[in-house]
Image: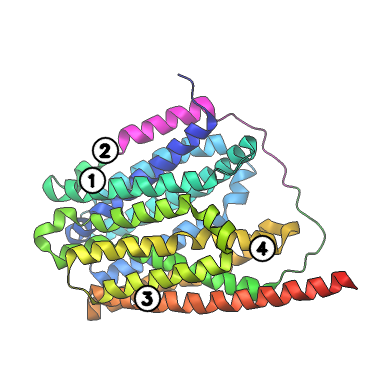
Amino acid sequence: MNITPRAAITLTFIAFGAVVGINVGALAVLQKQAGVTPLIFGYMAALGMLSNMIVMGLGGFINKHFDHRSVLLFILPIAYVGLIITLLAQSVLSFAIAIILFNLALGALDLFMNAEAAVVEHASSKPIFSSFHGAVLYAIAIFGIIGSIISIWFGPHWGLIPPLPIVALALYAIHHAIPHRPIAEHEENQKTVQLPKKILIFIGIVLGLNVACELTCIQWSGRLLAELAPQLAAYSGLGVTFYGFCNGTTRLFADRLRARFGDFKLMMVSLGIAIFGLIVLSTTPSFMISVLAFAASGIGLASIFPCLFSITAKLVPEARATALAFVSAIGGAPRILLPIGLGMLAQSYGLNAIYGAAAVVAAIALGFTYLAAKETEVRADSHLQVSKL
């Protein structure tokens, strides 16, 4: 069986999406099963995000000792075990431990599958990165609805079965198609690079706020839909399904949209669409309208991530890694703190309130996007004037 590196890494992205989708689809039932209130879940989501960021921050250290293939073969089964523990959690403590383990594994898997995807893209000599991210979002969408149906009809623990063949196939593909490579010594640019910190701070804030909005749609969708229509609780995964399909499809076309309209214009229009979808989610009592609003939110939030990373890389081409690390660090605070605030809102005012808050967050992101665009124009003009001298 001939498996290409591209097929192997695509299967890895799909496996990642499968375990995440099952988890998200079962979350509404799991929270009730473990006695987790919205407030407690807000703190747990923040703890999970912190765990995720910590392990991603250790990526450079890990990569100095182990190559991509070794890490992927080790961490993908750990992520699956994390899913199993989450599905079996029967108490607040066991649920919290499961979330920490699951997010630690997902953080490492996310980092190294993207690193290997970059190698595969470079070898192919054509842009294929968006296809990997489209695949993972489609997987989240499909397995999200599977997870919600299984958890209601049979019990969440049966959710461990659907992703198992995908995980096994991905491990087989990694083993046979991804080669061992010598662990590269990272040649860091030793000269001091002056970062455009003001612009990068604006971009980092937008990054953090965007991720927070995405997690709001993914992590809270099942519980919202289950409360809007308890008789349709088995289909509460439709929220993340529509979100994932629309987000993934939009990302497949993101490069073309960026080329036609430019990164900042695309981001501002996209955030406007996301704000609309989030406002609808904060006001409607309708199950189906909410599902469609999740779709609109998915379309609106899809292009933000690739645009931000592209802008950052273009701003500091001589030190891309340094600039991206700076932006990611700035974006960390909203990703950790917002889930806690959302949990407090959900506990006090109901689940619709968190989407009103997310709409405000997206509007703030839109404002910082505008500021970043203006600062980038000023910087470009100053560089142009210098070049003419």
Crowd class of label 1 (few under 14; some 14 to 19; many from 20; radius 10 Å): many
Find disc 4 in the rendering and name its residue.
Answer: 323
User: What type is the residue that disc 3 sits on?
Assistant: Ala
**4 or 2: tag closer to the N-terminus:** 2
Q: Nearer the viewer, mark 4 or mark 3?
A: 3
Task: Note whether 170 is above or below 157 in the view shown.
Answer: above
Tell me residue 243's x, y (percent): 33, 57
Vertical placement of 241 versus 76: above or below?
Answer: below
Q: Is residue 222 above or below residue 195?
A: above
- Label ID, residue 162: 2
Q: How is the image coloured?
A: rainbow
Give the CA distance from mark 1 to mark 4.
39 Å
Q: Along the line of sight, which residue is nearer the eye, 143 or 262?
A: 262
Instruction: Tell me what residue is drawn at x 63 percent, y 66 percent.
Output: 326
Image location of residue 102, percent across then percent down? 38, 51
- Residue 278: x and y in percent read 33, 72
Query: What residue is disc 1 on?
Result: 146
The residue carrying mark 3 is: 359
The kind of residue on which mark 1 rests is Ile
- For marks 1 and 3 on the same chain, the one whose residue lies earlier in the sequence: 1
Of the numbered discs 1 and 2, the one sitting upstream in the chain is: 1
Q: Amino acid at mark 2?
A: Pro
The amino acid sitting under disc 4 is: Ala
Q: Quadrant of residue 196?
A: bottom right
Locate residue 144, reporting x and y percent: 28, 50
Q: Marks 2 and 1: in contact by CB < 8 Å? A: yes
